[in-house]
Every structure is written in structure tokens, then in C-alpha cells.
Image (cartoon, rainbow, N blue to C red):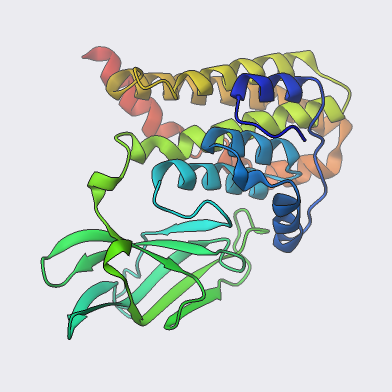
């Protein structure tokens, strides 16, 4: 695998068949594949492309995009290893949300989060929390192995089931001051970085799988066009309304490609088709919100 971060070069290598999907039935297999190919040494969008190209199922496609998003959205997060963004909390009240408290000059995190991606293998956690002293919402960066951190898996999630998904409990986890961050530390388009990177991974997946199955030009060419659009959105001049509209265009184009891809794999790879059909919700996961926002932007 060629090391580098020139996205256009990676697309050319992808088209040439340089990245072949690899069977990874478990998350442990996927982690081994990720580490063996040093995917976390690439830039954020390249990570998503490479991970998607090597993936053999949508669970890993999502995770490749998610890791690219983490690299871009949280520049303070360590580059090596897997990371997860912890936002969701228990709505029943049984498990209280997270809170930062200060005792004798030390800062501690306590409470619970109800969704952690790749919980069985995650290394770094970016946790949203309330600062009890200031009543501000902040983020803290912690390692999953720190004292006071407890992670547990959900039982058989129905969506992207190969990806471990779980809970986090924090009991007086000591937080250094330099591991506390605010929204000022995030890029301006932070909230849209997940669809940007997941759709990139998905298009790379459709290219590499189509090449593996004989080279369907309809799928390959349209997915490559989408990857080019994904790269254009990295341009710092594409912001605000233009970024949202461009992302909605990427989403729509990906959806059209996915229809042809679905027909292809139904004929040529029944096992892949069954996995695709089971987790097909990933293809349209971002569509309702993106298309609604883009329609409003176009009317302005």
C-alpha cells in the first residue's frame, strides 16, 4: 500500500485495483487489518477512503468513516489507535449524565454515557460533559484504560452488528487541565464531518467491491465522481451554505450509485448482498437532514 496523503493519487490507485477488500468477520479482525495497513497514519479523508476500500461489510465502512471524522473533528485527539465521541446519555434517568467536579484543585469526571463506538477496541474517548463549576458544556479527552473508566458492550445490536457498541461509566476519573476542550477547539463544519467521511468510505467500498466482482463501470465511475466531490469539500473556501449543498449533492449521488451497486452484488455475491441489505440503512442515514437543510439553503 502506497504511503501518502495525496487524495487524488489514492483515488487513482483505488481505480487501478490496488486496494482489495479483505475478509474481516469480527471487530478484532478489523482492528488487525487496520493496524497492519497503518491506516491511522493517513490524513482524515484518506483514512476513510482506505478503510472503506479494504472493508468487506458496512460495519467497517461506517467505522472507517467514523475514524476519519474523529481525526478531522477533534484535532487534539491522538492519531494512533481508535477513538470515539461520547455524547448520548440515558434518558430514563437511571444512569446520570456526566459531570466535571473539582476537589482540592483536581478535576474529576463522573457519570455515564450510553453509546460508544467500537467499545471493545477503542483507545481514546472524547466525552461531552457539564462543568459543574461554570455550568458550561465542555469536552474531555481520556484514554479508555484510565483508572475509573468502565466500558461494557451492548447485547447483539441490530444495526451494524459486527461493530461493538456499548456503555461507559466514569467514577472520579482524574482529568488534566490540558485535556479539557471547548467548541472553540473544533473546526467550523464539525457537525457535518461525520456524513462527509462516512459517504467517502462508502463510495470507496463500492469501487473496490465492484472491481473485485469484475469491474462494473457504472458503479465505479459514479462512485469515483463522488470521491472527487468529497475531496472538493475539503477546500477551505467551500463553507457554510456551499458546504451543506455540496454534501447533499454527495449524499444524493451516493444513493444513486448504491442502487446500481445493490443490483450488481445481488447477482454476483449473494453473501455480500445479504450483509448489504441488512445494514442498508447506512446509505440513507444522513439523507433526511442533509436534503432538508440543502433545500432550505437553495431557497435563500
User: Measured along the vertical axis of the image, is residue 235 above or below residue 40?
Assistant: above
Give x and y (percent) for residue 52: 67, 38
Q: Look at the image and tell me in which quarter the N terminus lies.
A: top right
In this image, 17 relative to 117: left or right?
right
Q: Along the line of sight, which residue is nearer the eye, 5 or 238?
A: 5
The image quarter in which residue 227 lies: top right
Q: Along the line of sight, which residue is nearer the eye, 106 or 125?
A: 106
Give x and y (percent) for residue 85: 42, 56
Q: Look at the image and tell me in which quarter the C terminus lies.
A: top left
Give x and y (percent) for residue 115: 46, 64
Residue at 54% x, 33% y: name it.
Answer: 45
Residue at 48% x, 45% y: name it.
Answer: 71
Give x and y (percent) for residue 224: 65, 18
User: Measured along the vertical axis of the image, is residue 298 above or below residue 37?
Assistant: above
In this image, 281 relative to 218: left or right?
left
Residue at 29% x, 72% y: name it.
Answer: 97
Question: Which residue in the rendered view is the most extreme toward the left?
Answer: 134
Amino acid at each position: 500500500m502506497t504511503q501518502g496523503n495525496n487524495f487524488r493519487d489514492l483515488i487513482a490507485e483505488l481505480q487501478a485495483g490496488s486496494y482489495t477488500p479483505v475478509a474481516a468477520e469480527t471487530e478484532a479482525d478489523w482492528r488487525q487489518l487496520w493496524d497492519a495497513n497503518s491506516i491511522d497514519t493517513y490524513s482524515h479523508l484518506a483514512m476513510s477512503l482506505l478503510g472503506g476500500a479494504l472493508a468487506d461489510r458496512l460495519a467497517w465502512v461506517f467505522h472507517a468513516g467514523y475514524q476519519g471524522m474523529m481525526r478531522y473533528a477533534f484535532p487534539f485527539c491522538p492519531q494512533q489507535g481508535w477513538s470515539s465521541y461520547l455524547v448520548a446519555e440515558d434518558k430514563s434517568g437511571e444512569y446520570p449524565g456526566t459531570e466535571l467536579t473539582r476537589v482540592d484543585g483536581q478535576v474529576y469526571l463522573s457519570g455515564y454515557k450510553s453509546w460508544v463506538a467500537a467499545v471493545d477496541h477503542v483507545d481514546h474517548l472524547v466525552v461531552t460533559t457539564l462543568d459543574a463549576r461554570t455550568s458550561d458544556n465542555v469536552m474531555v479527552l481520556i484514554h479508555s484504560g484510565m483508572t475509573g473508566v468502565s466500558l461494557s458492550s451492548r447485547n447483539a445490536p441490530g444495526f451494524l452488528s459486527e461493530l461493538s457498541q456499548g456503555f461507559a461509566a466514569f467514577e472520579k476519573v482524574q482529568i488534566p487541565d490540558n485535556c479539557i476542550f471547548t467548541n472553540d477547539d473544533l473546526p467550523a463544519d464539525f457537525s457535518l464531518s461525520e456524513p462527509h467521511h462516512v459517504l467517502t468510505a462508502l463510495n470507496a467500498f463500492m469501487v473496490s467491491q465492484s472491481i473485485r466482482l469484475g469491474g462494473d463501470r457504472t458503479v465505479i465511475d459514479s462512485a469515483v465522481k463522488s470521491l472527487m466531490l468529497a475531496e472538493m469539500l475539503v477546500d477551505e473556501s467551500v463553507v457554510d451554505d456551499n458546504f451543506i449543498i455540496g454534501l447533499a449533492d454527495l449524499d444524493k449521488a451516493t444513493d444513486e450509485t448504491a442502487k446500481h451497486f445493490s443490483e450488481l452484488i445481488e447477482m454476483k455475491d449473494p453473501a455480500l448482498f445479504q450483509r448489504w441489505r441488512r445494514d442498508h440503512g447506512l446509505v440513507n442515514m444522513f439523507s433526511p437532514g442533509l436534503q432538508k437543510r440543502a433545500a432550505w439553503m437553495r431557497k435563500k
